[in-house]
Amino acid sequence: MSIFTGTDTICALSTPAGMGAIAVIRISGPEAFPLCSRIFTPAEKDLDLASAPSHTIHFGRIGSKNDLLDEVLVSIFRAPRSYTGEDVIEISCHGSTYIQQKVLELILSEGARMAKPGEFTLRAFMNGKFDLSQAEAVADLIISHSRSSHDLALKQMRGGFSEKIRELRQKLVDFTSLIELELDFSEENVEFASRQDLTTLLNQLESEIKQLIDSFTIGNVIKNGIPVAIIGKPNVGKSTLLNAILNEEKAIVSEIAGTTRDAIEDTIVIGGYSFRFIDTAGLRAARDKIESIGIERTWEKINQASIILYVFDSSLSSFDDVMDSASEFRELISNTPKRLILVGNKMDQLVELPHGFKDFVEYETIFVSAKRKENIHLLAESLVNAIKIDGLSDNTIVSNARHLDALKHALEAIEAIHDGLKAHISPDLLTVEIRQALYHLGSITGEITTEEILGNIFGKFCIGK
């Protein structure tokens, strides 16, 4: 069966499964209005649902002739002014799981079928309501868990990323036309496309695509949460700091060094950004096999983190001690977007700031008392500022792994065109690589696609969307 037929009528529960105050059941397809007319009795006696105006809501009863199920609201959306571009009806009923099931059974008995995951959005894409990258942004919007991930998904759903891809693709299309025109006049040895202009265009395209590829690093952490590794020697208060940040007793706290044997993770939204904090085993020579595994995982989490919080005991550590420890990470974070923030814990035990720290400016340093939750707000502000410094702006940001893969393939094709120009290959060979680049850019927005790609993308959607 084809992934998309567009000739039948589908239905699904569009609100989360389970009991609630209300539930919304969506119907889309050519038989949506006649079907609903057979099971819905409007309170307005003269109302003909099949001819009712679009974008109107009507109160009435739903059920078979001899079996009243519920009193409902029916919302009407006529093609093409609907989410799917087809005739759509949304039935708002009471949230009883029994009512939900019975209404769906009634709709199915009238000839509709259950929608597949993402089929409403697939139909919207097939009917030109938005392109493929915008459709994928719908799924990202549904699962967004912070202001930043919401804003990113919303911008992509409204076409910001799509417009950038179309702009890049159009530049290649224009030049392909000129090169293919040369092929038509090959016997006259006419050059319609200046090789210097083409080189300039390729340089520009390479630069812009590389920027998009590089933006995935930050787009991915916005979408999935910014990983923050809390590291340091045993018994400096890493677990206490995690609990203070999360404002709950997530990690076990003990005066016994080496209590944390494995990485403990939790997520919290700060300043509109989702941060994924990872409390790790203390860095020291392992005393047993289990602790050794925990320390190995600490280094794994350090490599995965975007921000590293190095925690030290400010009541016991000297300036030189901290500098020596920080230098261990200098090579790790150099030439990377990783940020290292030093956190001097147990400031409540200090009489005065230890010698040397007043002039410590090489790394950002914040003094806190995790036990008393003092200056935790300063640490939170520092985390948000670190993300802003790392390049969040109004620029187009890539957050989808499929888009990243397509951009990388497009870049490879453009680099091959560049090499071909330098080698003075014939125009017909150049067009082969240009078409490859066009294909990969077009696959992002859906100008070029296959049923396999569509099935993979929309199969990950929830049913009802």
Image (tube, rainbow, N blue to C red):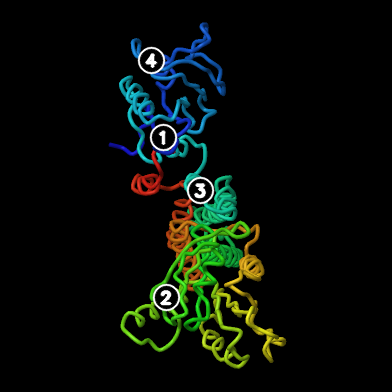
Q: Earlier in the sequence, mark 3 or mark 4?
A: 4
Q: Nearer the viewer, mark 3 or mark 4?
A: 4
Q: Depth check: 355 or 309 in front?
A: 355
**Residue contact at pointers 1 and 4, CB within 8 angstroms:** no
**Residue contact at pointers 1 and 2, CB within 8 angstroms:** no
**Residue contact at pointers 3 and 2, CB within 8 angstroms:** no
Q: Position of residue 356 (x, y in %)?
A: 68, 91
Q: Nearer the viewer, mark 1 or mark 3?
A: 1
Residue 214 shown left or right of residue 381 in the figure: left
Q: Earlier in the sequence, mark 1 or mark 4?
A: 1
Residue 207: quarter of image: bottom right
Q: Alpha-carbon distance for marks 3 and 4?
A: 39 Å
**Residue highlighted by disc 1:** 19
Dot 2 lies on which element? loop
**Residue highlighted by disc 4:** 68
Check disc 1 and give the amino acid type: Met
Q: Alpha-carbon distance for marks 3 and 2?
A: 39 Å
Q: Depth check: 223 or 32 in front?
A: 223
Dot 3 lies on which element? helix
**Residue highlighted by disc 3:** 137
Q: Position of residue 62 (x, y in %)?
A: 42, 17
Q: Alpha-carbon distance for marks 1 and 4?
A: 20 Å
Mark 1: few, some, or many residues within 10 Å (few <14, many ≥20)?
Answer: some
**Residue highlighted by disc 2:** 260
Q: Depth check: 372 or 258 in front?
A: 372
Residue for point 53% across, 10% down: 44
Q: Is residue 19 above or below residue 328?
A: above
Residue 240 shown left or right of residue 374 in the figure: left
Mark 4: few, some, or many residues within 10 Å (few <14, many ≥20)?
Answer: few
Residue 376 shown left or right of residue 50 in the figure: right
Residue 340: quarter of image: bottom right
